[in-house]
Amino acid sequence: MKRRILLVDGHSVIFAWPDLAEIHRRNTASARETVVRRLTALQDSSEWEVAVVFDGRGAKASSDSVPHGIAVFYSKSGQTADEIIERLAAKYAATCEVTVATDDHMERTTVEALGGMSISTDQLLSEMDSADGALRERIQNLAKKRR
């Protein structure tokens, strides 16, 4: 089975989900941390290997990851998150099942041309809800077996 990689346009998610947009209005770093926490939960409860990409807005280019956590990328000055997503999609599409979550239609078209798939931020939220429900069901089944 091919590795399943999910690349997430972090700011697309922040601006699409009202609760995150509200957090972003008060504190950009908190909104980013919330996205990372939610995506970590998705990775932990699904078969996805998740990476999120944020526009760094002049910050030093970096790739941070917590052991067993998701990969977090920040673009460098003069570079966009879209460029990083496209580079990663092109790199992995031949050997992995790559899906990009964004509401940027041009980005979705580009990723699909590179051999990847795309989903909207609404579809991502649905995927997260589904993975969370499946995890809860597995936990409940384990608890029943122990009784």
Image: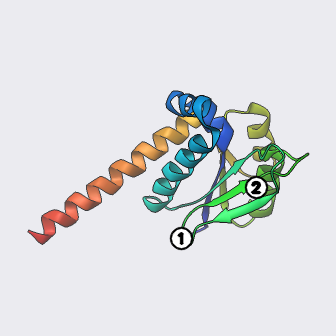
Residue density around tag 2, few if under 14, some if 14–19, many if 20 or more, within 10 Å: many
Q: Which mark is residue 89?
A: 2
State whether residue 22 appears in this view: yes
Which percent across, then down, holds residue 135? Answer: 34, 56
Circle 1: element type: loop
Residue situated furthest left in the rendering: 147
Cα–Cα span, label 1 and label 2:
21 Å
State whether residue 120 appears in this view: no
Which mark's residue is nearer the viewer, 1 or 2? 1
Which percent across, then down, holds residue 20? Answer: 54, 34
45 left or right of 33?
A: left
- Image quarter (top left, top right, bottom left or bottom right) of the C terminus: bottom left
How many marks can you see? 2
Q: Nearer the viewer, residue 45 or 27?
A: 27
Say which residue label 1 marks.
68
Residue density around tag 1, few if under 14, some if 14–19, many if 20 or more, within 10 Å: few
71 left or right of 61?
A: left
* Image-quadrant location for residue 88: bottom right
21 left or right of 93?
A: left
Residue at 67 percent of width and 33 percent of height: 103
Q: Nearer the viewer, residue 56 or 3?
A: 56
- In this rendering, is residue 92 above or below 130? below
Circle 2: element type: helix
Amino acid, disc 2 = Ala
Residue at 84 percent of width and 48 percent of height: 83
Residue situated furthest right in the rendering: 78
Amino acid, disc 1 = His
- Image quarter (top left, top right, bottom left or bottom right) of the N terminus: bottom right
- In this rendering, is residue 115 above or below 82? below
Which percent across, then down, holds residue 142? Answer: 21, 66
